[in-house]
Amino acid sequence: MKSSTPRDVSWLSRRTLLRRLGTTSVLVALWPASAWTTPEAVQQAIRQRIGDRTPQPDGMTLRLPPIAETGNAVPLTVAVDSAMTPDDHVLRIHVFVEGNPEPVAATYHLGVRAGKAEISTQIRLARSQTVLALAEMHDGAVRSATADIVVTLGACVEEIWSN
Amino acid sequence: MTKPRVRVPRTARKGEVMEIKTLISHPMETGYRRDVQGRLMPRHIIHTFTCTYNGEQVFRADWHPAVAANPYLAFYTVATESGSLRFEWIDDTGTVYTTEAEITVV
């Protein structure tokens, strides 16, 4: 019985593979410290916080302006639909910035005493991107909301032009 | 360093949900910028903000370099009893900035 033909990888000996992996890791190690975050780093940061739970894109809003002239101080508001009672409240809100050097912007710890699941702040955005917010509910559920933003002039990594 | 600014209602009804606004002046240096000599400027950010209400923590935030300079944060808390709200910001050098606000709950 023939199910599928495996790709011919006979050219890739164990020795070649190890050598190539070695070269790759040297290149990765030499990568400048200011490199952007990667989709893998974002995924890892998300998994560190919510494990294998699947976020539901419902029951919360993330407000960002659609366009920002500079990314230095972009107003951001996250609001979760929750009565904030002992039976229904938000434990934590996480904000992820996939287009920045680091994947996480902030984590906010709420609870019943917050009374209302809403926060407003100002964040830095290095370039145009999709910002993601996750809310961890008391019952283990996770909610998500995203917002796209166009950043004309990025923050964080620009040189300082001064005398 | 100027004193951090907070806006808390002076009086509130018991059980009322109050909005609290906070602002502190801080460079929030990301650690990714270079000075004119091309040297990387060391990271210097506030990494933790907490609000305690009569000694009990009611709100906390963990910050990363993506929080803008001079961090502004608005959040909510329930007015439970008269007393004081204490706000605390801790930065990478270990400096702790604090301020307090008194509230009367009727």
Image (cartoon, rainbow, N blue to C red):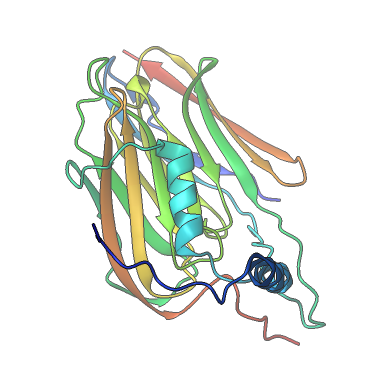
Q: Position of residue A31 (x, y in %)?
A: 68, 73
Q: Position of residue B62 (x, y in %)?
A: 54, 41
Q: Position of residue B60 (x, y in %)?
A: 50, 33
Q: Is residue A35 left or right of residue B42?
A: left
At x 32%, y 68%, the residue is: A5
At x 27%, y 42%, the residue is: A55
Height in image: A78 above or below B61?
Answer: below
At x 17%, y 44%, the residue is: A58
Tally of numbered discs: 0
Name the foreground residue: A147 vs A6: A6
Height in image: A139 above or below A17?
Answer: above
The C terminus of chain A, quarter of image: bottom right
Name the foreground residue: A139 vs B60: A139
Quarter-of-image position of residue A74: bottom left
The N terminus of chain A, quarter of image: bottom left
Name the foreground residue: B97 vs B30: B30
Q: Is residue B104 left or right of residue B2?
A: left
- Report if residue A100 is visible in the image: yes
Height in image: A115 above or below A160?
Answer: above
At x 62%, y 70%, the residue is: A13
- Report if residue B7 is visible in the image: no
Height in image: A96 above or below A109?
Answer: below
Name the foreground residue: B46 vs B98: B46
Q: Is residue A69 left or right of residue A103?
A: left
Quarter-of-image position of residue B74: top left
Q: Position of residue A49 (x, y in %)?
A: 45, 39
